[in-house]
Amino acid sequence: TDIQRIRNFSIVAHIDHGKSTLADRLIQLTGTVAERDMKAQMLDAMDIERERGITIKANSVRIDYPAQDGHTYVLNLIDTPGHVDFAYEVSRSMQAVEGSLLVVDASQGVEAQTLANVYQAIDADHEIVPVLNKIDLPAAEPERVKEQIEDVIGIDASESVMISAKTGLGIPDVLEAIVQRLPAPVGDRDKPLKAMLVDSWYDSYLGVVVLIRVMDGVIKKGDQIKMMKSAATYKLDRLAVLKPQMVDIPELGPGEIGVFTASIKQVRDTKVGDTITHEKKPCAAALPGFKPSIPVVFCGLFPVDANDFEALRDAIEKLQLNDASFSSEMETSAALGFGFRCGFLGLLHLEVIRDRLEREYDLDLITTAPSVVFKLHMKDGEVLDLHNPADMPDLTYVDHIEEPRIKATILVPDEYLGDVLKLCQDRRGIQMDLTYAGSRAMVVYDLPLAEVVFDFYDRLKSVTKGYASFDYQITGYREDFLVKMSILVNDEPVDALSIMVHRDRADSRGRAMCEKLKDLIPRHMFKIPIQAAIGGRVIARETLSAMRKDVTAKCYGGDATRKKKLLEKQKAGKKKMRQFGKVEIPQSAFIAALKMD
Ligand code: GTP
């Protein structure tokens, strides 16, 4: 393909502003997919993504577009994941294209993820075409939103394209804008091959499929290639473009985007951001800015039924085939038995994986409290990563502890600002900025990630009735007065309930957890003390009094069916319980006890 006739772009948008619908329309209008094969949201491959309406993995499509100037252009859309957990993948996808469509819902305006993603596009030197979507809605205010884009983002919005991705209005204008306003890629066909590994996924028929963007040189089927970071070499089996199904192609030149297979066994062997070159005639330098994605949030996953351990191991291995950023290590807990300590890129990532394990693999799981990675600076100078509060060493060996901090950006309508500030303050936040864009406030907070991983999203949504949008970036580690708090039930420590907490907040957290557990644990035939402790010192205590009556006692006399039902119900309830010494704790208690409200 003539490089002048290529346009590579991505679509940046806040969740629900219509990115997938617009992509579908572009594919449909250009006849890339036959009408009968068109299913809504073509690009969201996984069911779970479709159900939850979130796009997780970057994906791509090549569109042939006959433009008004009489030439046919190749338009490559790289779909970027919309969520913060995948910020690094977003930044790589951005490096692979020259321009972005900035889609903003004209009835909603700019939101936190719009900002986070558009800044990534600006960082990547993109030409940006603002697209105002949903102008079919009576509540659409395109003029106000244009102003907002100019005020908040600082780009010219006077030539925004007005569309309704739903009705198809304005879609031809989007295609023309891509051709006329976005630049063609630059690259040199005669230089050694230099291509970026943008994404990869596991396909059960093809093995690992690798999405690449060629910068310089030409890649052909049968080529012997080398990944510069991993230093592994492969022979290309198959080279193709995505339309969006794979269509074989003999070669890809500079500016082009496509996929290859090369008998690569696992996604783990393909590092996003790596540089691909020819083994024999390599390029001089790798592409800049490579960094591997590392898990930042950890939690334990345990089968409710100990017999499901092998099934859980298999399911985790299967999911890892496709997701190299999800890590796991076997863990044994005195309380929960055998399970896995798993690492994730963020909270949403955790939720998605847990959901898939439960639904696709039909497993009942106990998830322990998510924890961030703390850095333990030991007195002997060693620095340890603490992934699990249960592994906290004796404090006498620890000099100080550091925790990860984030920069959080929250956009919220005026009337909820007070509640948002209070929430951030309660979570040990430090306010860094507060500005207004129309009737919406934009607040920036420096917060400990540990205070956000658990239920911050939920709290934020509930205090703002769903009107706030939130985004964050990890900024680094900082020392604080952190301690491990243990929970003892009937004088036995329950390791799955230990947490790392700021010393100033330990007393109130401890009290709250004991109170909660008192309600969550059913009464037994004996009195049960529930305590929170730091080291050997108890900081909170509740007592669950003994059960007075047999549950069936109130079923007077002869009603045998009712009595049977009650006993069955009790038995079913048991399955969801874990035994701790003499005490049974319901599975639901583990998460519920940790919620802060
Ligand atoms: P994520 O995949 O979650 O990031 O969302 P998205 O940005 O891809 O949004 P999506 O395309 O799924 O659209 C979100 C909702 O808005 C869907 O219910 C669409 O039907 C609806 N929608 C999209 N475009 C329009 C439009 O032009 N007008 C109206 N009225 N609704 C639209």
Image (cartoon, rainbow, N blue to C red):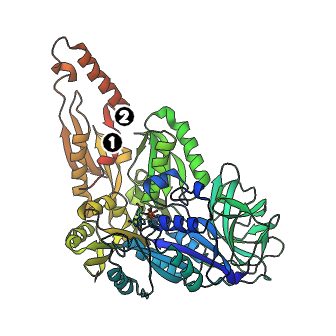
- Residue 455: image quadrant is bottom left
Quadrant hosting residue 507: bottom left
Point out residue 183 in the picture as x, y percentages from the top left corner. Answer: 60, 85
CB atoms at circles 1 and 2 under 8 Å apart?
Answer: yes
Q: Which residue type does callout 2 highlight?
A: Lys
CA–CA distance between discs 1 and 2? 8 Å
Q: Residue at x 65, y 52 (%)?
A: 203
Q: Vertically, is 509 above or below 585?
A: below
For residue 230, above or below residue 363: below
The image position of residue 436, as x and y in percent, is: 27, 82
Which image quarter holds the C terminus? bottom left
* Left or right placement of residue 231 versus residue 88 in this view: right
Q: Earlier in the sequence, mark 1 or mark 2?
A: 2
**Which residue does the numbered mark 2 point to in the structure image?**
576
Q: Position of residue 71 (x, y in %)?
A: 68, 81
Query: What residue does disc 1 label?
Result: 588
Q: Nearer the viewer, residue 405 or 415?
A: 415
Mark 2 is surrounded, within 10 Å at the Cα level, by few (under 14), some (14 to 19) or many (20 or more) other residues, namely some
Q: Is residue 93 left or right of residue 596?
A: right
The local secondary structure at tag 1 comes to helix
Nearer to us in this view, 313 or 28: 28
